[in-house]
Image (cartoon, rainbow, N blue to C red):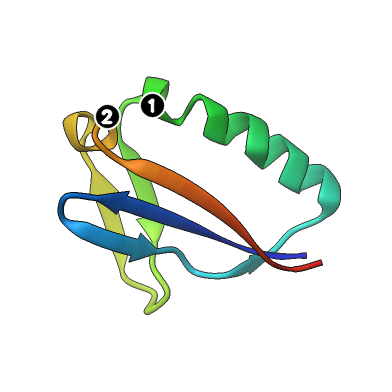
Amino acid sequence: MEIQLILKNKFGEFKGRRVDISEENYDKLVEMVKSFYNNGGFELTLEDESFVVFPPDIVKESILQLVKISD
């Protein structure tokens, strides 16, 4: 399946690079996303292949969305 992570905060919407993962890895990712706020900073490779790092204080004020593009 193809998925995409999207981070939303006061600075905007940051769309991660689309990736293909297995159903098993998707389930693991869902579990990891649940503790997103507890892990400090967050790193994301964006659609345009640029790389961003969000500090813990911004992560606490952000929403992380996991989108299934296709099965």
Whether 16 is drawn above or below 36: the answer is below
Q: Disc 2 marks which amino acid?
A: Lys
Counting from the top left corner in percent of width and height, residue 68 is at 67, 61
Residue, disc 1: 37
**Which of the 4 image quarters holds residue 1?**
bottom right
**Circle count:** 2
Q: Which residue: 36% across, 47% down? A: 43
Q: Which residue: 22% across, 60% down? A: 12
Residue, disc 2: 60
Q: Secondary structure at mark 1?
A: helix
**Which of the 4 image quarters holds residue 48?**
bottom left
Q: Nearer the viewer, residue 28 or 10?
A: 10
Pointer 1 with pointer 2, Cβ within 8 A: yes
Q: Secondary structure at mark 2?
A: loop
Q: Nearer the viewer, residue 55 or 71?
A: 71
**Of callouts 1 and 2, the N-terminal one:** 1
Counting from the top left corner in percent of width and height, residue 50 is at 31, 71
Q: Which residue: 65% across, 38% down? A: 30
Whether 38 is drawn above or below 14: the answer is above
Whether 45 is drawn above or below 24: the answer is below
Callout 1 crowding tier (Cα within 10 Å): few <14, some 14–19, many ≥20: some
Marks 1/2: CA–CA distance:
6 Å
Does residue 25 appear to the left or right of 17 in the view shown? right
Q: Which residue: 50% across, 24% down? A: 35
Counting from the top left corner in percent of width and height, residue 10 is at 16, 50
